[in-house]
């Protein structure tokens, strides 16, 4: 049974403390429910957490996989739609109709829907994404045809409605970078925003995996303890800067013969990146593994995590790498860069060239530097356990439900 009274952590106002709590009926709204993806993983974890706390949890979605907890149920809104733009618009419309006819004590929106009590801005502002990164996720011929423009216009319009006065009570930003953007683009009052950084599963992502799964994965690739392995992991290779990383890796490869690059993740443009690696003469020093279900083993097989993203509202992978004992090189347009300093990572400009990234990599490949940073990296991740993120999110929901 949930407790009768709880203390709200990190209150946004003095009225948010010591709120009486009864079980709430909470809707968590996101078009896609799945086991993979940053927002999807957060959705599952939060749903399970709230169910364990005794709340009635309903995931409102277009399609779904297995429930994350026996007491979590689904409300499936699968109206007819063809193409991503139509699906986006149809789901948003269906959600509004569903909410108009169904009672919930609290509605949390995690995607592109127009009205909810609390918005979690997990992807940042869509206009910012379009300006900084969208062209990098499209092939040249797709950009030439203007593919994606309608979907982006719809997403921006829905986001504008979601942040209009009266359409929400509270906003959760997953980084200070996103908070600043919400204030600047949508005029969201700072008092309405709570910054809650993503968290990490400190048991799943742990340095102890290096001796087992990490060593085994390296051996399967023909790499031994003498090699220094750089890891790039994630979907959306263009947005996350793999092209820049390949150029930078080629610049340092001659002076670092033991360096290797491991690329993990799904991207339909992967053949183009493989051709780029071949043109750069990288050969077997770069390996593309595609999408895997064991990211913890991939971190455990690596020594340095590199994410030269052009835009990422946070990036779970930064915390996962730190938790495994890997220092991180990323950019100032990655929200998780707020967690780094030179003892555990390097933050470079997202607008910089490959030479700037190569210089940062070369500094981390200096003898002994990575080893000296391992314990500090793990300690930095331990400040951000996933349980704390979930609890802080529940606190915001309870405060919003209290009025």
Image (cartoon, rainbow, N blue to C red):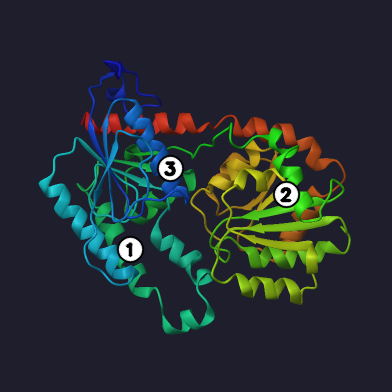
Secondary element at image label 2: helix
Work out whether residue 250 or residue 48 is closer to the camera in this orientation and state it.
48
Q: According to the image, label 3 marks what residue? A: 42
How far apart are labels 2 and 1 at the CA level? 40 Å
Residue 312 appears in the figure: yes
Q: Can you tell which quarter of the image residue 249 is in?
A: bottom right
Badge 2 local density, few (<14 within 10 Å), some, or many (20+)? some
Which of the two discs, 3 and 1, sits closer to the camera? 3
Q: In the displayed structure, does residue 379 sit left or right of residue 363?
A: left
Q: Is residue 37 above or below residue 384?
A: below
Q: According to the image, label 1 marks what residue? A: 155
Seen at 75% across and 45% down, the residue is 216
Work out whether residue 59 or residue 96 is closer to the camera in this orientation and state it.
59
Q: Are marks 3 and 1 in contact (CB under 8 Å)?
A: no
Q: Are marks 2 and 1 in contact (CB under 8 Å)?
A: no
Q: Can you tell which quarter of the image residue 257 is in?
A: bottom right
Which of the two discs, 2 and 3, sits closer to the camera? 2
Work out whether residue 354 or residue 181 is closer to the camera in this orientation and state it.
354
Quadrant (top left, top right, bottom left, bottom right) of the C terminus: top left
Q: Are marks 2 and 3 in contact (CB under 8 Å)?
A: no
Q: Is residue 141 above or below residue 131?
A: below
Q: Which mark is residue 217?
A: 2
Determine the residue located farthest toward the top in the rendered image. 4
Disc on the earlier residue, 2 or 3: 3
Residue 29 in the image, given as x and y percentages of width and height: 29, 48
Badge 3 local density, few (<14 within 10 Å), some, or many (20+)? many
Q: In the displayed structure, does residue 63 sit left or right of residue 288?
A: left
Work out whether residue 183 or residue 251 is closer to the camera in this orientation and state it.
251
Q: Is residue 156 above or below residue 328?
A: below
Residue 379 in the image, given as x and y percentages of width and height: 65, 30
Disc on the earlier residue, 2 or 1: 1
Disc on the earlier residue, 3 or 1: 3
């Amino acid at each position: 049974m949930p407790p009768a009274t709880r203390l709200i952590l990190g209150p946004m106002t003095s009225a948010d403390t010591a709120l009486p709590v009864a079980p709430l009926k909470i809707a968590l709204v996101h078009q896609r429910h799945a086991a993979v993806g940053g927002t999807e993983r957060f959705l599952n974890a939060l749903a399970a957490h709230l169910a364990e706390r005794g709340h009635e949890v309903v995931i409102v979605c277009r399609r779904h996989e297995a429930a994350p907890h026996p007491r979590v149920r689904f409300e499936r809104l699968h109206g007819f739609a063809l193409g991503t733009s139509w699906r986006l618009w149809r789901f948003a419309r269906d959600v509004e109709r569903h909410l108009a006819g169904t009672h919930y004590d609290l509605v949390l929106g995690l995607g592109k829907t127009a009205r909810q009590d609390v918005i979690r801005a997990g992807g940042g502002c869509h206009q910012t994404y379009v300006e900084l990164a969208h062209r990098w996720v499209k092939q040249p011929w797709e950009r030439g045809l203007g593919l994606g423009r309608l979907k982006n216009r719809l997403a921006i319009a829905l986001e504008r409605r979601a942040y209009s006065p009266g359409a929400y009570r509270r906003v959760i930003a997953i980084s200070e970078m996103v908070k600043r953007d919400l204030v600047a683009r949508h005029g969201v009052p700072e008092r309405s925003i709570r910054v809650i950084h993503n968290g990490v599963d400190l048991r799943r992502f742990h340095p102890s995996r290096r001796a087992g799964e990490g060593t085994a994965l390296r051996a399967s690739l023909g790499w031994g303890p003498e090699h220094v392995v750089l890891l790039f992991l994630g979907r959306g290779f263009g947005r996350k800067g793999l092209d820049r990383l390949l150029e930078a890796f080629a610049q340092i490869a001659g002076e670092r013969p033991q360096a290797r690059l491991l690329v993990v993740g799904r991207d339909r443009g992967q053949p183009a990146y493989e051709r780029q690696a071949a043109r750069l003469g990288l050969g077997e020093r770069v390996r593309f593994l595609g999408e895997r279900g064991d990211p913890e083993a991939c971190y455990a097989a690596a020594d340095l995590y590199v994410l030269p993203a052009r835009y990422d509202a946070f990036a779970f992978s930064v915390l996962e790498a730190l938790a495994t004992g890997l220092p991180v090189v990323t950019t100032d347009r990655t929200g998780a860069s707020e967690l780094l300093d030179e003892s555990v990572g390097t933050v470079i400009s997202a607008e910089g060239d490959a030479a700037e990234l190569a210089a940062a990599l070369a500094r981390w490949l200096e003898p002994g530097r990575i080893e000296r940073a391992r314990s500090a990296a793990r300690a930095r991740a331990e400040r951000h356990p996933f349980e704390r993120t979930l609890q802080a999110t529940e606190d915001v929901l309870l405060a919003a439900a209290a009025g």
